Amino acid sequence: MPGLDGTGILFENLIKALPKSLRIQVVSLSKLSGRTYYEQAGSLNEITKDDNLLLVAESYSGRLAYELCKLARNRVKGIIFIASFISSPSIISRFSGLLPISFIKPNCINYWAINHYGFNGHANKEKTQKIFHSIKITDKVKFKSRFKNIAKINDPTDKFNLPAIYISPDKDRLVSKKALKQLESLFDRLEIIQIPGGHFIAQAKPIECAKIIELTANQLSGKTLLCQSG
């Protein structure tokens, strides 16, 4: 399940690093019906109604995975959160719905911002260009609605007792420690695995993330791996 761009193309190197024996379905958020997290979770629940699932949720899609768990409790066998959140990721995110989408375009300032906040200053231009390309091809109306969803996100209360892993970049500038604590309080069996890097850890360290996913999938063998990115 992809991140804020919603396309899933930023999972390219992560998918390549995973064994071909895994049954993987990458979700395009733009193809889900509804605008809110809950509405999109309902659409996703219908699409996957015949499968048992290991969810992989990046960034924005953390709350989508959480809402899907509420609708498909018996079918979700585990979750891997990648630099993700299920409540407000930061104080600044409360104002994200006010951001004009036209401002998010390739220029020197935005290249710096993506590199600094997304890659902890260690990305080459090719990596940052892929981010802008994924934004360019996404549905702009639905892209804007995702920012609004982040701005309006509330604190969830339902608890889950299922295998869960949080891949935590040690220099995540976009998801606060408070947001991680909130997620940790609702998943009794959450294991936090820290990897050096910034928020876009799945893009910067695809092999390391793939190894964690593969190990978890092997422990929960026979399940569909549903990748959500954000």
Image (cartoon, rainbow, N blue to C red):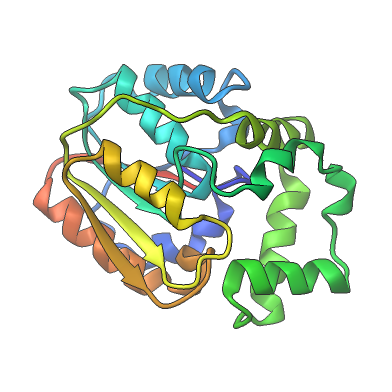
Q: Is residue 199 above or below residue 142?
A: below
- The residue sitting at 85% across, 58% down in the picture is 105
Residue 91 screen position, x and y as percent: 63, 47
Res 204 seen here: yes
Residue 70, x across and y down, in percent: 31, 21
Residue at the image point whose x is 37% and y is 32% from the top: 66
Residue 29 placement: quadrant: top right
Asked whether residue 19 appears in the rendered view, the answer is: no
Q: Is residue 184 left or right of residue 139?
A: left
User: Which x, y percent locates residue 18?
Assistant: 31, 62
Q: Residue placed at 38% from the left, 42% from the top?
A: 182
Q: Is residue 213 left or right of residue 67?
A: left
Instruction: Give the camera-side residue of 178 and 198.
Output: 178
Front residue of 41 and 133: 41
- Classify residue 35 as left or right of residue 15: right
How many numbered dots are placed on residues in this image?
Answer: 0
In the image, residue 31 sits, relative to residue 187, either above or below, namely above
**Residue 158 placed where, x, y %?**
30, 24
Q: Nearer the viewer, residue 98 or 103?
A: 98
What's the residue at 50%, 49% (across, down)? 59
Q: Quadrant of residue 209?
A: bottom left
Relative height, residue 123 to residue 228 (above, below): below
